[in-house]
Image (cartoon, grey):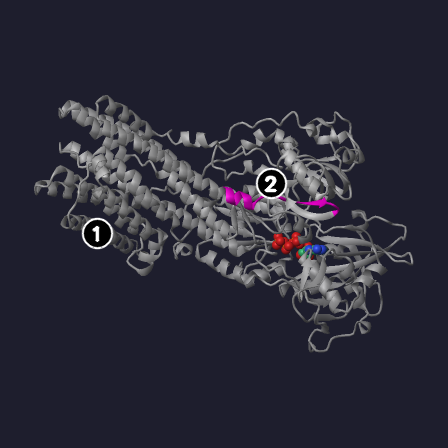
Amino acid sequence: MARPLRKVPNKVMAAVAIKCPTHMLHASPIAMSTLPPSTPPSPSTASTRTAWHSLDSATAVQRQGSHATHGLTPAEAAQRLATHGPNRLAQQGKRPVWLRLLLQFHNVLIYVMLVAAVVTAALGHWLDTGVLLGAVVINALIGFLQEGKAESSLDAIRRMLSLQATVLRGGVRTVVDAQTLVPGDVVLLASGDKVPADLRILHAKGLRANEAVLTGESLPCDKHAGAVAEDAPLGDRHGMLYSGTLVASGTATGLVVATGSATELGRISALLATVQSTTTPLLRQMARFSHWLALVIVGFVVLTFAIGVLWRGQPLAEMFMMAVALAASAIPEGLPALMTITLALGVRRMAQHKAIIRQLSAVETLGSVTVICSDKTGTLTCNEMTVQRVVTANQVYEVSGSGYRPEGGLHRSGHSATHNVALDDHPALPGITRAALLCNDAALHESDGSWVLTGDPTEGALLTLALKAGLDAPAEHARLPRTDAIPFESAHRFMATLHHEHTGQALVFVKGAPECVLDMCHAQHDRHHPAAPLDTDYWRRAANDCAARALRVLAIAVKTVPAQQQTLQFSDMQGGFTLLGLLGSMDPPRPEAMAAVAECHAAGIRVKMITGDHGETARAIGAQLGIGLGKPALTGAEIELLDDAALRHVVTDVDVFARASPEHKLRLVQALQANGEVVAMTGDGVNDAPALKRADVGVAMGKNGTEAAKDAAAMVLADDNFATLGHAVREGRGIYDNVRKFILFMLPTNGGESLIVFSAIAFGLVLPLTPAQVLWINLVTSSTLGVALAFEPTEGDVMRRRPRNPRQSLLSGLFVWRVVMVSVLMACAALGLFLWELGHGSSLETARTMAVSTVVLVEMFYLYNSRHVLHSVLSREGLLGNPKIPATIALCAVLQLAFVYTPWLQAVFGSTNLSAAEWLRVVLAGASVFAIAELEKAIQRWRMGRAAPAA
Ligand code: ATP
């Protein structure tokens, strides 16, 4: 069975997007809302009624009023776009604005406040009713705006992943946004592409499509331009390509017959929509926690109310107000919304650094990754190949010059680079370089003084070699035109081409991995004989020698076939070739990847390299990168000999896997996971999808990756660079840190306030904070301050810590202790000052204003403490590292001054003017909580000794 392509050449990928269609993105799990059912496609759309598959392609083109070789004119396309609308499905992932606003009221605290508003109104406390209702509205509005901000951040990221399509407009190949496709457009597709609309195939070559998304059939099916019966089921309509499916191999030209919701995908979009995961484990854990906490608090409040009224004999109305204050102070209402914002902002930051998150949960998982399995070519290496060595049967040559610029030449190994050899004196060389030039799909051209490659870098290097050897490329192509080819695929590791000379002679050239090509050969070209017996040992030694120098090795061979042969089949590749020689190319490691590998190692993350390349090459490159130093590489063939248990054992020690195919990747992920590792795996090909899905974080390549890989991945690297992955791990850890810091900041405010109110009830004191004042603190000041922590830069030592245990609970012992400690400190400070003021003859208003201001000041100071969980903030970085902190503190100070001095806020909240001496006491209380919190961190650091950074 032939396999779909694992990797497509860059040339092809130029026409592919980094991207997936917006209409597929409703299945993208970064959307954060649950979806309403889809609307069925409009029955009036003519394209849904015509059985395009039963028409021959010429009729289809005519019916669409298009032209097979020119497509539509740009003006016609624009006009049709206005009629048919954009090629996307109705944004089903989005809830209408009114529903989003309404859902803000669906929350335990809001219910408590609404009940309280009704009761206060019944009791005739109109001012309290007004404050409560005002607070309900403000709370809903804040939630609504924050959610909107989070969604727009994620929308922007979704747009980065939108699909492009190559179309013929007025006879010119143009790359357009797939959303602008209209019925009648002629689209060009190549393997690895995602089909951007429903297409009637006009031409196809070796075309196979993976339609699993529509039919559930996981094997690719053959496609051609022929018509089928009108009643043929979807899976048998071979003349059609459907939107959202993938081109597994071959090329095609297709006529757009349906776009947007009129496509077959549009019909089943409701099914796809359900595939969505709407939140992350952390958000779920936190939402559950807040919900549970709110219920406990409501129960507790009811109990307190009962005790106060029945046991302490407090008046009903006063006790009710106390109960409302307690509920309002204890419920952490802003927490889930602000956590979402922290995550969304972090994800946006990652996208700016070229790591595009497709599943929000990947952000959290990244922080606990213990093993990264990476591809080699293009990810760890530059993917800029240069042939450095040519081995013939009698001689080894070195090649001078670097990059794709054809400057330099060949000289005998061990001789000076200035002594370039003349091809005529070395009869083996013209054959090798000609084969390298002709068995090649890449193209090189000079632009603004630099040489630009279109196509696969491995092949680009061969073109440069041929030019360095002095071949005239156009003349060679004219002399030996290509009749057919078997393109390169990672699965069979060779490429072959058939050529016909004008004299009638036919030649097949093959290039590929030495093991494969040697198996096809029975002879070798040497100095004395163009077809001497093959010395297999010599070639194997030579290949290993090249590989040990970190060179990627290709073998090149040729055979003559009967002149009448016009096509090339796999059966033609089984033997009869004459080996011309070996070519060794250098693909240098990316310097930034070396640093990133070292950083990952320091962060307790093992980096494993999985490559299709030769074992020795892989080992040598690995050594340069610091991967698998001094350890042997395991090959795909060896993996196949191991059962699952043995593989689990071996996988821990081996870091370099060579000659591995996508199936091996899947087994490796499974073995690592069985050992308890959290695995990030990179991939680019159609066949990598299962491994990417199985990995804890599947990472697809944005530039060279197929759409299939991107669909399966949780994250896309826009620049294919390992360093970007390393950076994403750092950001993932940073975002998680920020969420923790945020919780650590928010919970003590609720804790402190409820302790203040509860102590007043327990000791029969007058309430230090009224319900309205509690709402002021929670909704106005703490939410404003807390947002600043979402902008915290990632801490410097984040990559010197061990990976986070994914099973570790968010609320660790240290967390609970810190929350309790700060809550108690806050309560002591506010309650202490309140009682002291009352004891010294101040009015109740003054004492309460002091209590509110103390809580707010403690929050302001504690916001600084919260910047680092364990490290001191008494440093330049600690105090100035996040400019949003002083900015929000300043804003909050203005609000608090307004609370104290503005007459109408005084009227609403019962606050009053404070004197300078009173302010001094408030500031001192805040500063002492800051000092104690820093002291506690120092004690914790001392206790944990060198383990401190791990927290
Ligand atoms: P990875 O990207 O996973 O690190 P790789 O790029 O090293 O893998 P493949 O692209 O699968 O591996 O290539 C495997 C082998 O196939 C190479 O070592 C080389 O011998 C051969 N090969 C690579 N590209 C071509 C090509 N264009 N034509 C012929 N043979 C090739």
Q: Residue at x 41, y 46 (%)?
A: 805
Q: Which mark is residue 21?
A: 2
Residue 436 appears in the rendering: yes
Q: Residue at x 10, y 41 (%)?
A: 842
Disc 2 element: loop
Question: 242 above or below 411?
Answer: above
User: Residue 827, percent across and down?
Assistant: 20, 41
Quadrant in which the N terminus appears: top right
How many residues crowd around disc 2 within 10 Å: few (fewer than 14), some, or many (20 or more)? many
Q: Residue at x 49, y 54 (%)?
A: 726
Q: Nearer the viewer, residue 897 or 494?
A: 897
Question: 608 above or below 817?
Answer: below
Query: Label 1 vs label 2: CA separation?
Result: 54 Å
The earlier-in-sequence mark between 1 and 2 is 2
Could you tell me the amino acid type at mark 2? Pro
Q: Which residue is mark 1?
A: 927
How many residues crowd around disc 1 within 10 Å: few (fewer than 14), some, or many (20 or more)? some
Disc 1 element: helix
Q: Which residues are magenta?
A: 155-171
> Taking 853 as reference, is 332 left or right?
right
